[in-house]
């Protein structure tokens, strides 16, 4: 099931294979974002209709001055 834009609910995160939090704490944060932020909910819905998969993990070993990091991987079987 792919929800329409604006329709994602916190319970739908399990049905969104394009957004994959890698631990329970991050899963809860994503659910809270979907529930409380129309902007975040719209981004999650847009992602769910794309061919992109996003893995979310918390890393504490960033270089000084960085608060986040993106890593891009290649395509496999039509999924990015």
Image: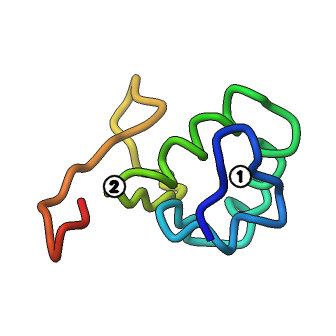
Q: Residues within 10 Å of mark 1 (few under 14, many from 20)?
A: many
For numbered disc 1, what is the local secondary structure? helix
For numbered disc 2, what is the local secondary structure? loop
Residue 2 is left or right of residue 60, and the answer is right
Q: Position of residue 78 (x, y in %)?
A: 18, 68
Relative to residue 29, is residue 15 depicted above or below? below
Q: Position of residue 29 (x, y in %)?
A: 76, 52
Closer to the camera, 65 or 50?
Answer: 50
Which residue occupies 79% across, 55% down? 31
Closer to the camera, 49 or 37?
Answer: 49
**Quarter holding the C terminus?**
bottom left
- Tag of residue 62: none
Relative to residue 45, is residue 80 depicted above or below? below
Q: Position of residue 37 (x, y in %)?
A: 80, 31
Residue under label 1 = 30
Closer to the camera, 61 or 44?
Answer: 44
**Quarter holding the N terminus?**
bottom right
* Rendered image coloring scheme: rainbow
Which residue occupies 69% across, 26% down? 39
Which residue occupies 75% across, 51% down? 8
Relative to residue 13, is residue 7 depicted above or below? above
The answer to which quarter of the image holds residue 28 is: bottom right
Which residue occupies 40% across, 23% down? 65
Label located before the other in sequence (2 or 1): 1
Which tag is nearer the camera, tag 2 or tag 1?
2
Residue under label 2 = 52
Residue 6 is left or right of residue 51, and the answer is right
Inter-mark Cα distance, 2 to 1: 17 Å
């Amino acid at each position: 099931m792919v929800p329409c834009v604006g329709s994602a609910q916190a319970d739908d995160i399990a049905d969104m294979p394009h957004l994959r939090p890698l631990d329970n704490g991050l899963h809860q944060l994503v659910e809270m974002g979907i529930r409380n932020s129309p902007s975040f909910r719209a981004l999650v819905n847009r992602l769910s209709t794309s061919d992109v998969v996003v893995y979310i993990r918390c890393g504490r070993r960033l270089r000084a001055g960085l608060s986040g990091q993106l890593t891009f991987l290649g395509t496999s079987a039509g999924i990015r």
